[in-house]
Image: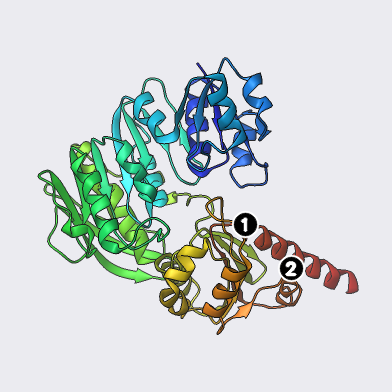
Amino acid sequence: MKYFLVGILGTGMSALALSLKERNEIVEGSDESTSFFTFPSLDEHHIPVYRFHKKNIEDHKDFFFIIGYAYQEDHEEVQEILRLGLPYSYYADFIESYYQGVKIGISGTHGKTTTALFLTQLLSKEDICAIVGDGTGIGNDPYQYLILEACEYRQHFLKYHFDELLINNIDYDHPDYFNSIDEVFFAFQRAANRSKRVYINQDDEKARQIQHKNKITFSLYEPSDVQGKIIEEKNNGFMLEVKTKDQQYTFFLPFTGIHMVYNFLAAFAIYSTINQKIDILPSHVFNFNKPKRRMEEVKCFDNIIINDYGHHPTEIRATLSSIKQKYPSHYIITIFQPHTYSRTIYLYQEFQTCFSLSDEVYVALTFPSSREERDPFKDKLVKDIFQGFSNYEEEDLERWSLLHKTVFLFIGAGNIYEDANKLFMKINEKSIEKKNKI
């Protein structure tokens, strides 16, 4: 079968493209440009990406079209698909109908991508397909399990019927759609109602309120089906004990930040439930490669440059906590790029306090995303929210390139990662200049 994906560079759409390609389907797609971090993986798998133009549709009339949710009837390619009466489906509808294996949904306001990748590695010896929100796509033919990152935004996860659904946490986000935390909670409850079995983090205040007749719980502090206990915390990870009904494990988890422990426990709860006979955990799990743009670290002499996708106050706080645990004696400079005006303005109090573990904070212009257009008035509102911090300018990179023993955290869901790469180049340039002078 031949598939053409409209908006192929989106993190979910690019993962779907890769999964289909690995299943030997013919895959092509379009987007507004190729300057996004998901493009290299598509290019590596020889998946053509075209610039948006209605001619793409005419040229691919014998393809089935899959459309990303950011593109509606006012988009030129969607208009052309409808005008020509060509077969199409939106992202989640396609996944629900195409993948027929055991559907495992990984949901929660935070940690979905990391948890999904933990589970793909735990189940790597099984025949799986996976669609993960950092652009990771896995496809096998045949396959037993589909591991799917399930997003609550606009209640997209209600398009699916899951055999197994994880709810790792419930926090208030997407204020452009949800009016309150109660609305967010009820969306997760509806997703649970459509699932055969759910996995719940008992330590999360809202998640533990989810009702389901077939519920598996996990926790570090409350009595649960999968009981974790941190025996020792080190600057490079945690010594962890995990008990299930029949077994007990003690191992070193080489990740910093308590949120990583919960992400692992969540994946392990699913793994231990659907695999009844576990003699030993796969060793490669402990050499886990983090998702793209999640605490991606590069060492540059005695400095550390980190690129992270975090864009919610809870995620920022967790990332800084991880950095403090791993680099307790380093100076920390955070460069934050807000993502969407609505989130930043509504959660302004949380944003004003979530950077407390950083020594300096610089704030870039908001990355509005496809949901919003650039708005000078809202830019002024955001600037007022962060008036206690410095405005970020690219010229700051020159000054920072002279610093030592500093962690530079570039954090946000937009394109701020590009400036992390620029800083890396500048620090190296300064080093070469010093050597030449000597």
Is 154 positioned to the left or the right of 28 in the image?
left
> Quick one: 229 or 378, which is closer to the camera?
378
Q: Amino acid at mark 1?
A: Asn
Q: On screen, 47 above or below 303?
A: above
> Quick one: 432 or 392, which is closer to the camera?
392
Query: Where residue 420 sits in the image (x, y, percent)?
Result: 65, 62
Is residue 189 visible in this depiction of the protein? yes
Disc assigned to residue 415: 1
The secondary structure type at the circle numbered 2 is: helix
Q: CA distance from mark 1 to mark 2?
A: 20 Å
Is residue 27 visible in this depiction of the protein? no
Residue hosting label 2: 427
Is 423 positioned to the left or the right of 145 in the image?
right
Q: Earlier in the sequence, mark 1 or mark 2?
A: 1
Number of dots carrying numbers: 2
The secondary structure type at the circle numbered 1 is: loop
Q: Residue at x 58, y 76 (%)?
A: 383
Q: Residue at x 21, y 39 (%)?
A: 195
Query: Where residue 95 sits in the image (x, y, percent)?
Result: 39, 30
Q: Image quadrant for the C terminus?
A: bottom right
Local crowd at mark 2 within 10 Å, few (<14), some, or many (≥20)?
Answer: many
Residue found at the very far right of the displayed protein: 437
